[in-house]
Amino acid sequence: MITGIGVDTVDIARFERQLERTPALRERLFCAAERELSTASLAARFAAKEALVKALGGSGELGWQDIEVVRDEYRAPGFARTPRLVAALDARGGAAAHLSMTHDAGVATAFVVIDSLGRQGDGTHTDRSSHD
């Protein structure tokens, strides 16, 4: 059963200008493994984090560092299983957060669906349709 849906879109050029104006944003918004990625990939990850918060119905106790976008062995995106993310999913009645993200034509978009059945049963799940 679906317990939450979230989507977010980021203008990549605007996002890049924000990162240039405020260099500390990169460290505040992204985990160490994410920080060295291209601006387009960072924008997609920021959209993913925002979409997840929307799907959860708010950030609650989650901080930016509690939400890390990772890749599985097939390069499909998903969220790292951090303690606060697991707690947020549990509080929402969710077992899995499914993620799809993309960037093209100057925008990055991410879509998150939280469900209570979770195919992997470990609190994370990915959608293999992404190309980020």
Image (spheres, helix red, strand yellow):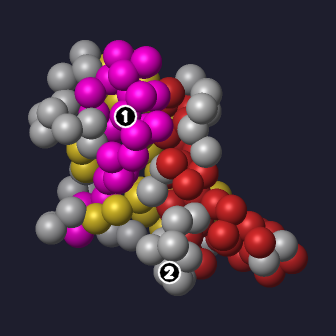
Furthest residue in direction front, as rendered: 83
Q: Nearer the viewer, residue 94 or 54?
A: 94
- The nearer-to-camera label among 1 and 2 is 1
Q: Position of residue 127 (x, y in %)?
A: 25, 50
Query: What SS does tag 1 mark?
Result: helix
Alpha carbon distance from label 1 to label 2: 25 Å
* Total numbered circles: 2
Q: Can you see residue 32?
A: yes
Bounds of the magenta span? 75-100
- Classify residue 10 by image quadrant: bottom right
Q: Is residue 86 above or below residue 105?
A: above
Q: Which residue is mark 1?
A: 86
Tag of residue 37: 2
Q: Residue at x 13, y 39 (%)?
A: 120
Q: Is residue 95 a member of the stretch shown in magenta? A: yes
Q: Is residue 28 a member of the stretch shown in magenta? A: no
Instruction: Tell me whether the residue at label 1 lies in contact with that at label 2, contact meaning CB atoms closer than 8 angstroms.
Output: no
Q: Is residue 14 above or below residue 60?
A: below
Which residue type carries mark 1? Val
Crowd band around label 2 with a 10 angstrom C-alpha radius: few (<14), some (14–19), many (20+)? few
Q: Position of residue 77 (x, y in %)?
A: 31, 59
